[in-house]
Image (cartoon, rainbow, N blue to C red):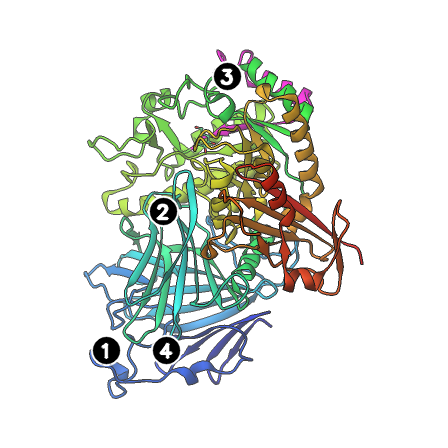
Amino acid sequence: MSIVFNPDSRLFVLSTKNSEYQMKIDEIGILLHLYYGAPVGGMDMSYRLWHVDRGFSGNPYEYQEERGKSLDTLPQEFTGANVGDLRISSLSIRGANGSRSCDLRYKSHEILQGKYKLDGLPYVRGENGTLAVEEDAQSLIITLEDALIGFEVKLLYGVFEKKDVITRSVIMTNRGKDYVRVNKISSVCIDFPYGRYDLIHFHGRHCMERQMERVPVKHDIISIQSKRGMSSHHHNPFVILCDEDTNQTQGNAYGFMMMYSGNHKTEVEKDFTDSTRLVMGLQNSNFAWRLEAGDSVTAPEVIMTYSAEGLNALSSNYHHTIRENVVDAKYYNLERPVLINNWEATYFDFNTEKILQIADNAKEIGIDMLVLDDGWFGKRESDHTSLGDWFVNEEKLQGGLKVLADGVRERGMKFGLWFEPEMISEDSDLFRSHPDWAMTDPERKPMISRSQMVLDMSRKDVQDYLFERMSEIIRDADIYYVKWDFNRSVSNFYSKELPSDRQGEVAHRFILGTYALLDRLLKEFPNLMIEGCAGGGGRFDAGMLFYCPQIWCSDDTDPIARLRIQEGTSYGYPVSTVGSHVSASPNHQTGRSTSLKTRGIVAMSGTFGYELDLTKVSEEEKELMKQQIKDFRKYYWLIQHGEYYRLTDDREQNYFTAWEYVNAEATEALVNIVITDSHANPELPYVKLHGLDPEGWYMIEGGDRKYKGAALMNGGFVFGMLIENMMKEPDNYPSEMYHFVKIG
Ligand code: DGJ
């Protein structure tokens, strides 16, 4: 049993293979958080609580004679508000009488077999029969309430024993008679009463997403958030809390990943007792949800994991969970198509003939799918117009989309198409006929970005229109794949359909509307494959991955810049979800020139494809591309399902980046290196490999030396040949991929 409740000690113990999580109901019904970390054998960890009377930390009424027991210092599983805990809180509410107080006490709990599901929100899947890898998950639902006002908070836990994962979500219900306004809702609150921590988070910008940053947690509040209506390029909804000395291979690390694609916030506070609290949930500056009697609101799910063996192991837990329990199981054993996308090849300037020329070349080198990007609809000659007018532009695509799609299929490839469903151009027939569908404030000029506005996805009529337009096109042209783009931050959150006191719900309803549309389309077209995208990786989150098996990782296709973006992404997300393409050199975003080989090696750490004008590449380049595609297919399962290890660490300030994949049996490993900075007379790049059989013997395919697994892992591997070649023939960013095969 991974969930045990002891009625005598009122202790909850949630166990996974390598972690334990404890909560306890105290004498007056406060749900204490006792412990999260390496297994402690079920020992009641309340011995660590020391009730010191600290000045200015008052007591619940029942504890007035026990001054050491204050909500301000007790570690809590989920806080109320305005009743004595003056640290960051898990919720904020306002009752009809204006009171903002909420005093939560334990009411009941239930333990269920299988994993709970959420209605209208993505969740980690746990029902056997629908999973790629079967697993017996269990759920715990604890109900807390403020009995005075009838406010109920259900805490949901899903325990995935083998994956070392615990999921959390929260449902708030108004069981009182009057309405209640929820001004803040969190999915997770967790207290670490002891220890010194670093916070790792992933910030960025368009074309430079998920840059790993590590900061010490000091006596203040760190806040990582997005108010952009999207999970954002700027702050990924994923953080790691770890010991100060944790590195890739050792030390305690705790991950918190929100399965959500909209506004989110994570706060981390180290308080006056040196206790660290993390709260993760919906960003609340634009949030206010009105609950009439009987109504509920749900906080998105957070995937928590713990590793005692550093950051690589923490990432591995996420990689398995996302591949096996978040992404639709049908993609687990399905080899994804190697694609050619026309965006960086043609931008808006294409017609049927041009695309078919690209298709001819794509076929020749062995590509599986052609994706037609932006510009095929309405009067879309530039990014100033036509979003929302999802009708084929027959001036560009003579004879319609089907002619082109059939042409691509005749060449033996699948056909994919770009949409940007949630957007509307001011210059569009859709806006002219439905101005109220754009999300704008009444009488105020809207914020325009990339010449576009955002559709009010909270409206059913908007969802219906998009469903109908997209379905018709997908059906008529028999489309296999959709690239689902989203190219601006959201502002002017306002729905003309909602009353004034519900406008604070729009940002969340917007995302619920997007999820509803995704869900509906996937039910209508169960074989449709959707690749998420938001100006590259602006919505690279586990929420989108519930619907889309892969996401375009960044609009920056420069392989050297991509190394950092993909490395940052790898902390939480598996390679099988990372859309990555070989593009032209010099690169369109950075102007940097790199070899086709290096571009190939970096793009192969993803779902792999090309995004350049294949009619303009030389025969020699085509030959290399053919080989790259063959290599990618050869290593496909090793790359997509292998254990992934970062061999270099940002903190070491190397002049190279190296990473490794090892299959489950440890019979094969693929070791990649890219030199990222040119040094004359350079040091020899050196790494220690991971995951091999220490007793086994390995050879590099094509080489003649034997290496013992233990030697490669403890004594390391030197990239001597790469440096020797580089010194003979200087090359800016040389790279290599070494295939180690176990021979005995
Ligand atoms: C942003 C995407 O990330 C690009 O790949 C491309 O699809 C453009 N939008 C098209 O407008």
Q: In this picture, is 591 found above or below 314? A: above
Tell us which disc is closer to us: 2 or 4. 2
Question: Which residue is label 3 attached to?
Answer: 350
Question: Which residue is label 1 attached to?
Answer: 57
* Mark 3 to mark 2 CA distance (whole Å): 38 Å
* Mark 4 to mark 3 CA distance (whole Å): 67 Å
Q: What is the three-letter code of the residue carrying label 2?
A: His
Magenta range is 393-421
Residue depicted at x 51% and y 38%: 559
Which SS class for mark 1? Answer: loop
Q: What is the three-letter code of the residue carrying label 1?
A: Ser
Q: Give the mark, 3 or 1, whose residue is nearer the N terminus.
A: 1
* Mark 3 to mark 1 CA distance (whole Å): 68 Å
Tell us which disc is closer to us: 2 or 1. 1
Which SS class for mark 2? Answer: helix
Q: Within 10 Å of the Cα at label 2, are there few (<14), some (14-19), or many (20+) other Cα atoms?
A: many
Residue situated in front as seen by the camera: 446 or 106:
446
Q: Within 10 Å of the Cα at label 3, are there few (<14), some (14-19), or many (20+) other Cα atoms?
A: some
Whether 418 is among the magenta residues is yes
Question: Which residue is label 2 attached to?
Answer: 508
Q: Within 10 Å of the Cα at label 1, are there few (<14), some (14-19), or many (20+) other Cα atoms?
A: some
* Mark 2 to mark 4 CA distance (whole Å): 32 Å
